[in-house]
Amino acid sequence: MKKLGKWFKNTWAKFSNLLKNNRILKWIRKTWKRFLNWLRAKRDKTSVWYHNTRFGTWHKKHRRKISDGIVNGITYLFSSVGIVILLAILVFIFKNGFKTLSWDMLTGDYHAQMFNTSLTEDINFKKTGYTDPNIENTYFSTRWGVSFIDAENNEGRPVVEIAHIDKDSPLRHMVLYGTEDYIEVKVGYNVEKIMYSGVDLDPDDDHTILRKDGAEQAALQLDQALVIDDMVTSYSGGGIRGSIITTLYLIVLTLIIALPLGIGAAIYLSELAPQNRITGIIRSMIDMISGIPSIVFGFVGSAIFIPFMNGAIGSNGGSIASV
Amino acid sequence: MERLVSNEINTKKIANRSAIDKIAKWFFLCITLICASAIVIIVTFIVIRGISPFIKDYSVNGELYRVDLVTFLTGTTWFKRPNTYGIGFIIINTLYIVFLAILFAVPVAILTSLFISKIAPKRLGATLSYIIELLAAIPSIVYGVFGRGVITEFVKNISSFFGYQSAGGTSTLSTVLVLAIMILPTITMLSVTSINAVNKNIIHGSLALGASPTQTNFKVVLISAKSGIFSGIILGVGRALGEATAISMVIGNRGNGPTFNLFDTSRTLTSTMLMGLKETTGLDYDIRFSVGIVLIIIILVTNLILNFIKSRIGRVR
């Protein structure tokens, strides 16, 4: 360390000597000084004229005040930068975040529950003309007794939501694809995809309702369907309940591990340790940890802890213990 | 055995106590050693994984390759198939970006700290220092989102004003602005502490000699606090060099360089490590540990140099 400092000092001294004794540099410095002197003389001449004007006398009288005012003004301006930045960040985050912030988002799951369903075999088509409950902004399919509404999901994307289902509607007795479990399509579910078939349908059409079609199209197309071959509905999704819980869980676990270690080391270093060289080395080692960038911690963590946890508990990939 | 101490004193208890003391001392020593060994473990793992691309053969598409160290340290292209990696331009870009960020942040930080501790009325100063603390507490990912949403748009507009087509605003300038915002609170908080610690006698002496308060602030207070301000700058440089998430969101990760154009995309060491990660094995993963070694070395060297400069200019005469 000391050697390095000495080397720096020596090199700097040599370099500055070189600069001082260079003939060309000397000449440049001399000329520059001459130029400045010439400028000063000229300014003095003009300043006599300037200070005799009305503004000039005022300026001469308040010179200190004016320059102080300018400097203070710059200080005020620069220190308002912090406020502006904080305001900009808050406005940006709240403006974009409030649109999709809702209780559903805070408590919902991140992945939507998907139901891939089809019609039951023993369905009774007794009733075909259902009555429209006439809810505002909804579009009703009289053949199936279900009304759709345009809505937004937790991520702010447009979806087709089911607003009402008649109590006799066959959609209340759908069978889950690949099983024999019955499931009831409920109000509040989102339509992801409906594939249908019927008679006199346009052969060029794909006989599919997608979420991008919108509620009106969905109701119109569903009225043409005689049989629903495949109906995919989803519920909720885009929520952050899991993320919130995991974050808190992580904080608690981290504190449980880090607090005893940190406090113990602090007690030792400040109260018990003998003041010698080894203690100094340990201290500087602990100081160095705080200087390591987080990305390096990330890489070391992935190199040490993920294989370790994989071996220890047989997980594969990252796990919460390695975090 | 003859007792040498009075009967009032329970020697057994004292012996017990000192035994407990000893055990506690060893216990705390163990904890301290665990803490201190973390750095050893980190450095060891980084070095082991980081050196292996240069001394071990890796199989890429069925053939064995290793990386050339000289090309790695001086290269002007990050990745060329199958085994050419170069980070020379990335080092230059990183230092350039950090230098510009410091250039933006330092005047603002110093003037803000001067305002907080000397110029502003007490309540306004307290509010402003609270705001600065809030800025320091905002996590870096939020700065990244803010940069992506606001600063890149701003930079895009500027560059189109100059008639330059930028890559959607992801550029050196956006990175510099985000970094400057992020290191502003660090420098400001340390500067406030050091300005508050300036000896009152010096200030009173200056005022008594007839200097105006503004003159005193700029010519006496700042000069006597420069050592503390400089340690703030050192911390800021450390934070700027090590920042990864926020930078990666606005930098655009250019593949070759070096670029000094403010409106062009760029690449820093940290964004190189973070972005384009695919698998956690193989050459493309291990080379990032080598980048990590270079990053740590650069941080250490800059800290050494800055500390040296600080010890030179920090002397108050």
Image (cartoon, coloured by chain):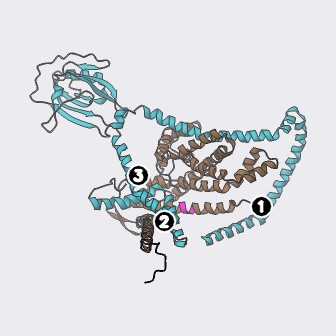
Chain colours: A cyan, B brown
The residue furthest bottom is B1
Q: Amino acid at mark 1?
A: Leu
Q: Answer left or right for A178 relative to A288.
A: left
Secondary structure state at the residue bearing disc 1 = helix
Chain-order first, disc 1 or disc 2: 1
* Mark 1 surroundings within 10 Å by alpha-carbon count, few (fewer than 14), some (14 through 19), many (20 or more): few
Specify the subunit that label 1 lies on.
A
Residue situated in front as seen by the camera: B110 or A197: B110
Specify the subunit that label 2 lies on.
A
Same-chain check, marks 1 and 2: yes
Q: Amino acid at mark 3?
A: Gly
Q: x and y percent of residue B135 in the render?
A: 54, 44
Residue ID for mark 3: B276
Residue sitting at x 60%, y 54%: B232
> Does residue B300 show up magenta in the picture?
yes
Residue ID for mark 2: A268
Secondary structure state at the residue bearing disc 2 = helix
Residue sitting at x 62%, y 51%: B193
State how far apart marks 3 and 1 are (Cα): 50 Å
Residue situated in front as seen by the camera: A32 or A166: A166
In the rendered image, the quadrant that contains the N terminus of chain A is: bottom right
Give the magenta part as a residue range: B298-302
Specify the subunit that label 3 lies on.
B
